Amino acid sequence: MQRTFTAFQGHRRLASGPAGEIALVVKRITPPPDEPIIIFEDSTGRPIDFDLRGGDREVLARVAKLVPPPVEESAPPSEPRGRGRPKLGVVAREVTLLPRHWEWLGAQPGGASVALRKLVDEARRVSGDKDRERQARDAAYHFMLTMAGNLPQFEEASRALFADDRRRFTGLIADWPVDVRDHIVKLAYSDRA
């Protein structure tokens, strides 16, 4: 899934889309803005800085390093796999567990790594909706804090957002600048119709 970004100049939304597109839109704004332009990563609601110096190719190259394109899961190779570890984008990290946990993991078919991957996949399946709701709420809050932290009823709106009281939340932000308000609602509730 491709990450999306949204640029705002003051309380006005300029554009939304992939990182490269947004960087070029912002770069092409010629007169120095009287209000700052802030680019937000939509999945987190946090501001991100793009280095817009130089030509379009240079800007796009820097943005590609900062925001790499999504890794697509590929189909299994038709050739039989050779010896050694499969190249699945595996990242080795340290995990600290109690001895009884290591014993249980070691006794599982395929060993500790396979068992941990299965446990994580099951947990993601079971709590996926709640995790997505939490991430959407957090993204909306981070964006709201930056763009609306000084607007009327910010604290009450924050409480309503975290209480998942959508009706109260949208009522409290109804008088905020339209683009800011609409973007907050999109971040918080777009995956929940």
Image: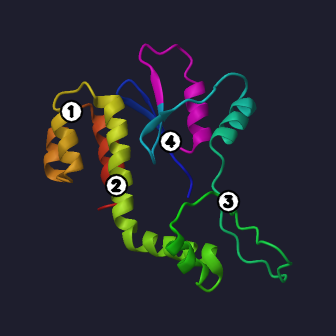
The reply to whether callout 4 and callout 2 are in contact (CB within 8 Å) is: no
Residue at numbered disc 4:
5
Residue at numbered disc 3:
92
Residue depth check, mark 4 versus mark 1: number of the one nearer the observer: 1
Residue at numbered disc 2:
134
Residue at numbered disc 1:
154
Q: Does residue 32 belong to the magenta stretch? A: yes
Task: Residue at 32%, 33% (x, y): give it.
Answer: 145
Relative placement, left or right, of 158 versus 24 is: left
Give me the C-alpha separation between circle 3 and circle 2: 27 Å
Instruction: Name the secondary structure under disc 4.
Output: strand
Relative placement, left or right, of 154 versus 185 is: left
Task: Residue at 53%, 70% (x, y): give it.
Answer: 99
| Screen quadrant of the N terminus | bottom right
Residue 77, compared with residue 20, is above or below; it is below
Locate residue 86: give its quadrant. bottom right
Task: Residue at 22%, 40% (x, y): give it.
Answer: 158
Give me the C-alpha separation between circle 4 and circle 1: 23 Å
- The region drawn magenta spans 16-38
Residue 58 rendering spot, x and y as whole percentages:
74, 30
The reply to whether callout 4 and callout 1 are in contact (CB within 8 Å) is: no
Residue depth check, mark 4 versus mark 2: number of the one nearer the observer: 2
Residue depth check, mark 3 versus mark 2: number of the one nearer the observer: 3
Give me the C-alpha separation between circle 1 and circle 3: 42 Å
Give me the C-alpha separation between circle 4 and circle 3: 30 Å
- Mark earlier in primary sequence (1, 2): 2
| Screen quadrant of the C terminus | bottom left
